[in-house]
Image: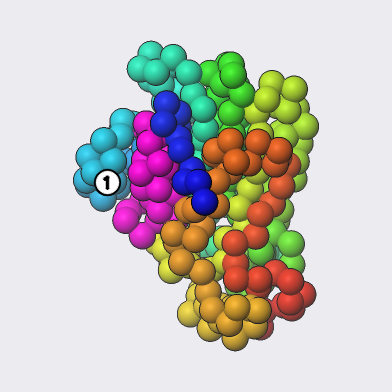
Amino acid sequence: MMDIDLKGQRGLIVGVANADSLAWAAARLMRAAGAEIALTYLNDKARPHVEPLAREADALLLPCDVTRPGELPAVFGALRRQWGRLDFVLHAIASAPKEDLRAPLVDCSAEGFAEAMLVSCHSLVQMAKLARPLMRAGGSLTTLSFYGAEKVVEHYGLMGPVKAALEASVRYLSHELGPDGIRVNAISAGPVRTRAASGIVHFDELLADATRRSPLRRTVEADEVGRVALMLASPYASGITGEVVHVDAGFHVEGMVFH
């Protein structure tokens, strides 16, 4: 069996918050496969958690808050100056105001819904636009989704419609960027205990339910998600685009609604 080799490849990973992040699992594996990588951090509060990881991976480290005008273009401008090209992007950011995230969908505010869409979905569209001129030889864009985009997951609230929009965006972007040799895919990850997951109420119940109902009778590990992100960024996935790849121990095949 051949190992995936990303030597000579350069990639941007957006969404590393700390060492427990799914994005960090992917970044670490991509670096181990030989890729040069760039990481972003949200703000000064987040930087101390990400900076040691960037040093460990010998990665470029850039600030990126997609809600602040100019920051995302500045990231791609820095990569253009530093590298001149880009081979892959991992988009792993999602956010919503806590009061809207924890409210029933019917009670979420228009402002909270718009912010969740901007951060969690439209930022992928922005990244695709900015990455396109740097991916002159083709490339790969991958984002992270969740089963709540397909079926109702209790307490997931407004993030369900937002992730559904994200998955639809993957399909449309794959159509638009395919002629340039750019593949666009999503990973629908099973529940993993991360900082982002901590915002979902009753998350422990979701983990227990996934363990009980998944065909493999367990949840997934961050590295299992990271390995699929690595594969999608590599030539091994050269024929895969517009896809939502489930890495959830089979949870999605059960066709159930979590209560």
Residue 107 shows up from this direction: no
The answer to whether residue 17 is magenta is yes
Relative to 50, is 251 above or below?
below
Label 1: which residue? 53
Q: Residue furthest bottom?
A: 212
The answer to whether residue 42 is magenta is no
In the figure, residue 184 lies in which quadrant?
top right
Residue shown at the point (65%, 28%) measured from the top left: 182
Residue shown at the point (42%, 26%) measured from the top left: 8
Q: Nearer the viewer, residue 225 or 151?
A: 225
Residue shown at the point (26%, 50%) measured from the top left: 49
Q: Nearer the viewer, residue 156 or 145?
A: 145
Q: Is residue 51 left or right of residue 64?
A: left
Number of marks in the rendered image? 1
Q: Residue furthest front?
A: 1
The residue tagged with tag 1: helix, strand or loop? helix
Q: Nearer the viewer, residue 67 or 76?
A: 76
x and y, in percent, of residue 99 in the image: 51, 63
- Callout 1 amino acid: Leu
Q: Which residues are magenta?
A: 13-38
